[in-house]
Amino acid sequence: MEPLRVLIVEDHPVFRDGLRALLTSIPGTDVVGEAASGVEAVAQALALQPDVVVMDLDLPGIGGLAATRQIVATSPHVGVLVLTMFDDDDSLFAAMRAGARGYLLKGADQDDIRRAILAVGDGDAIFGPAIARRLMEYFSVPRPDVRDAFPELTERERQVLNLIAQGHANAAIASRMAISTKTVRNHVSNIFTKLQVTDRAQAIVRAREAGLGVREEGEH
C-alpha cells in the first residue's frame, strides 16, 4: 500500500515539530510538507496533493477556515483534519461548513490524533470525544424554527429584524434589501411596537433568542 501523505499546517514551530515527530512514528504515514500560514497551506495542498491536511485554525494571513474552504474547493479528495485550541461551537460548525472531515482539540492524546489522521485519510469523518459529545448535545436540543418566530411580524419585518440582529445599521439594511432608509426606519418602528421593545439592543436580544441573526460563514 502507498503511504498516507500528510501536510502539516501549524504556525507554532514547537508544536509543528512535535506533530511531525508523531506522524513520522505512524507506520505507512509520510509527512510530505509543512506550512505556517493559510496562504502557504493552500499553495502546498495544491502542489503536493496530500491525502490529509492537519490544519490549525489560528493562522496568519487568511486563516485556517478560509484555507480549508479553498483546499476542499480545488481538491475535494483531500481530507482536512482540524487540530486547534478553539473549542467553541462557532469554530466547530464553521469548520464543518468549510469542508473539514474531522475536528480535534490540541489537548487530544497521541492515540486520538493517530486514529483521526488514519480515519480522515480513509475518507471517514471523525471528531474527538469531547467534540463528539458537544455535537450530540447540540443536535439533541430542540431548536426554535425561525420561520415560526414572531408571527405578528410581516415577512419583510422579519427580514429587517434578522439583519438588525446581525448588527447591521439602517443604511446597510436598506442597501441589502434594495429599499430606502426611510422604509427601513418605518419597519424598525413597527418591529419595536410589535415586539414591545424600546430600543435596538432589546430587539437584538429577542431576535437572537428566537434563532435569528445567525451569519453564514464568510458573510460580512
Image: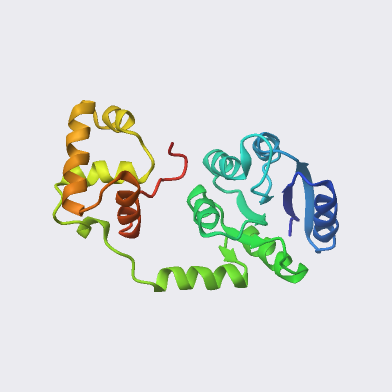
The foreground one among 176 and 186 is 186
Looking at the image, residue 14 sits to the left or right of residue 43; the answer is right
When the figure is inspected, residue 136 is found, relative to residue 68, above or below; the finding is: below
To which quarter of the image does residue 173 belong?
top left
Looking at the image, residue 91 sits to the left or right of residue 105; the answer is left
Say whether residue 58 is visible: yes
Residue 142 percent coordinates (x, y): 34, 71
Looking at the image, residue 5 sits to the left or right of residue 99; the answer is right
Most extreme residue toward the front is 198
When the figure is inspected, residue 124 is found, relative to residue 181, above or below; the finding is: below
Name the colouring of the figure. Answer: rainbow
Q: Residue at x 63, y 54 (%)?
A: 82
Residue 163 percent coordinates (x, y): 32, 41
Quadrant in the picture for the N terminus:
bottom right
Q: Residue at x 26, y 29 (%)?
A: 174
Q: Residue at x 22, y 56 (%)?
A: 147
The foreground one among 135 and 165 is 165
When the figure is inspected, residue 94 is found, relative to residue 109, above or below; the finding is: above
Residue 145 percent coordinates (x, y): 27, 61
State how many labels appear. 0
Quadrant in the picture for the C terminus:
top left
The foreground one among 185 and 87 is 185
Q: Residue at x 86, y 57 (%)?
A: 21
To which quarter of the image does residue 149 belong?
bottom left
Say whether residue 179 is visible: no
Residue 192 percent coordinates (x, y): 21, 47
Looking at the image, residue 189 sits to the left or right of residue 205; the answer is left
